[in-house]
C-alpha cells in the first residue's frame, strides 16, 4: 500500500508503525465486527517487545474503571485540591465536579444516555475538559469538535459520528 504524509512533520518509521497498527486494527474488525473497539489488540508483537525492553518499574494491573468512575473516585477525595490549570485559571476538583454535574444534568434533560454521541465544541481548554467529563460520566460518546476546523470538515465529522446533541461554551 501507499501512504502520503508531510515529511516535515513525521518520520518514515512513525508512519510505517501507524499504518501497521491501522491495518492490524482493520483486520481484527473484519474478523470480529461485533466486538467493541476496546476488545481489539492495539499493539503488535514488535510494540510489546519494544515496551518490554524499556523495563519500566513495577507492572501493576489497571482497574477496569471508566473515565467517569475514575473522575468520581478522584473528586471524592480531592475536594478543593487543584484539578486543572488552564490559561492561568486554577480550577479545584470541587469546582470542576460542580461544572461537570451542571453540564451532565443538561445533557440528561436533552435525552443523552449511554452510547449517544455528543459533540463538545471548543478548543483545547476547560470547555473540552468539562464537556468531555460530563459526556463520559453518562456513558455517552465524547466527540471533540475543534471550532478552528473548516466548517465543511466539522459538519462531515459530526454527521459521520451521528452526533445527536452538542455542548457549546457560552461566549
Image (tube, grey):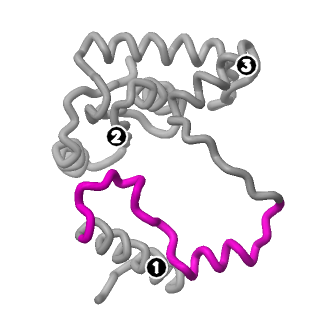
Q: Quadrant of residue 120?
A: top left
Relative depth, front residue between 29 and 91: 29
Residue in the picture at 32% in, 48% down: 149
**Magenta-colored stretch includes residue 47:** yes
Q: Gap in Å between the C-alphas at discs 1 and 2?
A: 25 Å
Mark 3 or 1, nearer chain start: 1
Q: How far apart are marks 3 and 2 (CA)?
A: 27 Å
Quarter of the image for the C terminus: give it.
Answer: top left
Q: Is residue 10 left or right of residue 70?
A: left
Numbered tag placed on residue 86 in the rendering? none
Part of the protein shown in magenta = 31-57
| Callout 2 secondary element | strand
Image spot of residue 112 (x, y percent):
27, 22
Characterize the local packing of mark 3: few (<14), some (14-19) or many (20 or more) Cα atoms within 10 angstroms: some
Question: Dot 2 corresponds to which residue?
Answer: 143
- Residue 37 screen position, x and y as percent: 36, 54
The stretch drawn in magenta includes residue 86: no
Q: Mark 1 points at which residue?
A: 15
Which circle, 3 or 1, is nearer the viewer?
3
Q: Which of marks 3 and 2 is in front?
A: 3
Q: Report which residue position mark 3 lands on.
A: 78
Q: Residue at x 44, y 10 (%)?
A: 102
Amino acid at each position: 500500500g501507499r501512504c502520503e504524509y508531510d515529511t516535515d512533520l513525521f518520520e518514515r518509521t512513525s508512519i510505517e508503525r501507524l499504518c501497521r497498527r491501522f491495518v492490524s486494527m482493520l483486520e481484527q474488525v473484519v474478523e470480529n465486527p461485533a466486538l467493541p473497539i476496546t476488545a481489539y489488540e492495539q499493539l503488535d508483537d514488535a510494540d510489546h517487545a519494544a515496551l518490554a525492553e524499556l523495563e519500566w518499574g513495577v507492572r501493576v494491573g489497571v482497574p477496569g474503571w471508566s473515565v467517569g468512575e475514575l473522575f468520581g473516585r478522584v473528586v471524592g477525595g480531592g475536594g478543593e485540591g487543584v484539578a486543572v490549570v488552564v490559561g492561568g485559571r486554577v480550577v479545584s476538583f470541587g469546582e470542576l465536579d460542580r461544572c461537570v454535574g451542571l453540564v451532565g444534568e443538561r445533557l440528561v434533560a436533552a435525552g443523552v444516555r449511554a452510547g449517544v454521541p455528543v459533540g463538545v465544541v471548543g478548543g483545547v481548554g476547560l470547555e473540552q475538559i468539562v464537556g468531555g467529563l460530563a459526556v463520559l460520566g453518562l456513558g455517552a460518546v465524547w466527540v471533540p469538535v475543534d471550532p478552528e476546523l473548516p466548517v465543511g470538515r466539522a459538519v462531515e465529522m459530526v454527521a459521520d459520528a451521528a452526533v445527536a446533541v452538542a455542548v457549546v461554551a457560552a461566549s
